[in-house]
Image (cartoon, grey):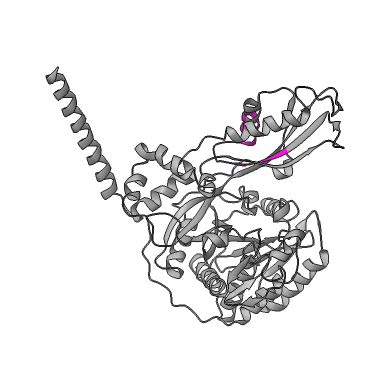
């Protein structure tokens, strides 16, 4: 018996030592995927560019069903007057009244053009939250180093930043070798049907193919991860899909609330919603998320470097820890969010029908159909009808774009030049962007907003006190200038 115990002890020790050796080897031999490049000298940008963006923020180009056409027309006038060289030099085309294409032709037509996207519309401000803003949401006020207002982070900063960068280059006599197109949709916040979809269809009919496409997306986040001291620049290589399912509980009869049956339509519906929340989709580390860890693993300190460099062993542990944080969990699973409930016409009448809308942001590898199938399986109640979402607002996750492409590498290089001491990694964008409409036009589609912000700033996107630092906006314009020079030669 002692010999057996001794043998098992030795076996355990040998196994432990071998495991420790493998973990150490994988950690120490992990190659950095960062591009080392010289920092470019910061050109001095005048405060007048802030005034221009401020004027754009003051225009309430809200898309939420019907739009205020006057605000969009005023924005059109502002763009033309603020960027005269762009409008004198680039070919401009208007799509469905308020979306725009700009074509800056290069000297070499054999090079595939680059397409840079943004959108001019913003989400509305809830009337109940207006008094919670530190400044009026459409004031465009510049105060204490910040420019305030709806659209400063989503997404007028990119519209104005791109045009400002092009204007600056044109003022210096820059002539690109490669053509670049800008495409600005006006209804991204309501699905992009009249803007991005129409523009993409036009490009397809023209037989265009782009070297790479860039849109809004992930940012440069400070204090992004434990073990990573430097800001983390995340380039979105794909995004989640989107669908909203309608759950409807149906009963053959209602009645008076004084004589309730054992189960009511409202109760059945509530049980279904609770079942979905108590049975979330499984977490996975694959695709864009696995590439994310591959890029950051060599850059983090102990013990995170051991964990991230050995996902074959630690994946479950990492997923469990990240799953405790709502933001982190969103990159690991298809999320389930009940957002609307409806049922009954009076407080003393039992309704025969009660419905809920549940929004899902779909992880790559799953589809709108597999999500609906799993929802029906989890609810497991024939009295609850699960209906597919509006096709305009439902889409599967787009394909994963490569990190070996010219587009990803030129963006990574530019980040290093403009934002030194920054770690770059591919990422999964958890929100929807216009980029999803352009998948037929390039295999290389990236989602990145060149802005360094904090977690607190992230919460203001679509929220209260949305703002951008004046320094951050100037760095964004500098980034686009360098990106254009790097891409168009």
Whether 368 is among the magenta residues is yes
Residue in the image at 59% along x and 53% along y: 209
From where the camera sits, is residue 126 visible?
Answer: no
From where the camera sits, is residue 217 visible?
Answer: yes
Q: Is residue 357 above or below residue 202?
A: above
341 vs 207, left or right, is right
Front residue of 22/134: it is 134
131 vs 220, left or right, is right
Residue furthest left in the image:
3
Magenta segment boundaries in residue numbering: 357-374
Residue in the image at 67% along x and 34% along y: 273
- Residue 415: image x %, image y %? 46, 65
Q: Is residue 441 above or below residue 114?
A: above
Q: Quadrant of residue 8?
A: top left
Front residue of 364/375: it is 375
Work out which quarter of the rendered image holds the N terminus and state it.
top left
Front residue of 411/327: it is 327
- Residue 378: image x %, image y %? 62, 27
Q: Quadrant of residue 4?
A: top left
Q: Is residue 116 above or below residue 297?
A: below
- Residue 160: image x %, image y %? 64, 70
Residue in the image at 53% along x and 74% along y: 471
């Amino acid at each position: 018996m002692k010999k057996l115990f001794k043998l098992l002890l030795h076996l355990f020790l040998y196994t432990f030592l071998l495991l420790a050796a493998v973990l150490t080897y994988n950690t120490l031999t992990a190659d950095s995927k960062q591009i080392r490049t010289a920092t470019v000298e910061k050109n001095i940008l005048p405060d007048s560019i802030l005034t221009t963006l401020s004027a754009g923020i003051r225009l309430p180009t809200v898309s939420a069903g019907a739009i205020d056409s006057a605000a969009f027309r005023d924005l059109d006038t502002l763009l033309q007057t603020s960027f005269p060289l762009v409008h004198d030099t680039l070919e401009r085309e208007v799509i469905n009244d308020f979306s725009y294409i700009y074509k800056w032709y290069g000297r070499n037509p054999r090079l595939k053009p680059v397409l840079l996207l943004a959108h001019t519309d913003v989400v509305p401000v809830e009337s109940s939250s207006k008094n919670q803003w530190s400044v009026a949401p459409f004031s465009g006020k510049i105060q204490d180093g910040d420019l305030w207002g709806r659209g400063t982070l989503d997404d007028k900063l990119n519209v104005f930043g791109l045009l400002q960068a092009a204007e600056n280059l044109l003022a210096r006599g820059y002539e690109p070798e490669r053509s670049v197109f800008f495409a600005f949709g006006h209804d991204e916040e309501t699905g992009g049907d009249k803007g991005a979809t129409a523009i993409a269809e036009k490009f397809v009919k023209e037989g265009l193919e782009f070297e790479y496409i860039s849109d809004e997306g992930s940012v440069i986040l400070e204090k992004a991860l434990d073990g990573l001291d430097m800001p983390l620049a995340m380039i979105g290589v794909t995004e989640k899909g989107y669908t909203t399912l309608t759950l409807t509980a149906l009963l053959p009869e209602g009645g008076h609330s004084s004589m309730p049956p054992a189960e009511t339509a409202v109760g059945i519906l509530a049980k279904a919603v609770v079942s979905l929340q108590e049975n979330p989709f499984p977490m996975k580390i694959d695709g864009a998320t696995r590439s994310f860890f591959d890029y950051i693993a060599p850059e983090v300190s102990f013990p995170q470097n051991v964990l991230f460099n050995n996902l074959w062993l630690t994946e479950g542990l990492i997923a469990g820890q990240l799953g405790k944080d709502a933001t982190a969990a969103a990159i690991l699973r298809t999320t389930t969010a009940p957002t609307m409930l409806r049922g009954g016409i009076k407080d003393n009448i039992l309704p025969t029908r009660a419905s809920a809308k549940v929004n899902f942001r779909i992880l790559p590898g799953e589809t709108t159909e597999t999500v609906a199938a799993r929802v029906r399986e989890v609810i497991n109640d024939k009295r609850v009808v699960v209906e597919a979402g509006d096709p305009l607002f439902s889409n599967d996750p787009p394909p994963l774009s490569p990190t070996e492409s010219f587009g990803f590498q030129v963006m990574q290089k530019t980040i290093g030049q403009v934002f030194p001491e920054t770690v770059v990694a591919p990422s999964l964008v958890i929100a929807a962007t216009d980029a999803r409409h352009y998948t037929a036009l390039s295999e290389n589609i990236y989602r990145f907003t060149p802005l360094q912000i904090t977690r607190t700033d992230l919460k203001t996107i679509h929220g209260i006190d949305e703002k951008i630092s004046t320094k951050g906006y100037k760095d964004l314009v500098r980034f686009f200038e360098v990106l254009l020079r790097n891409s168009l030669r």
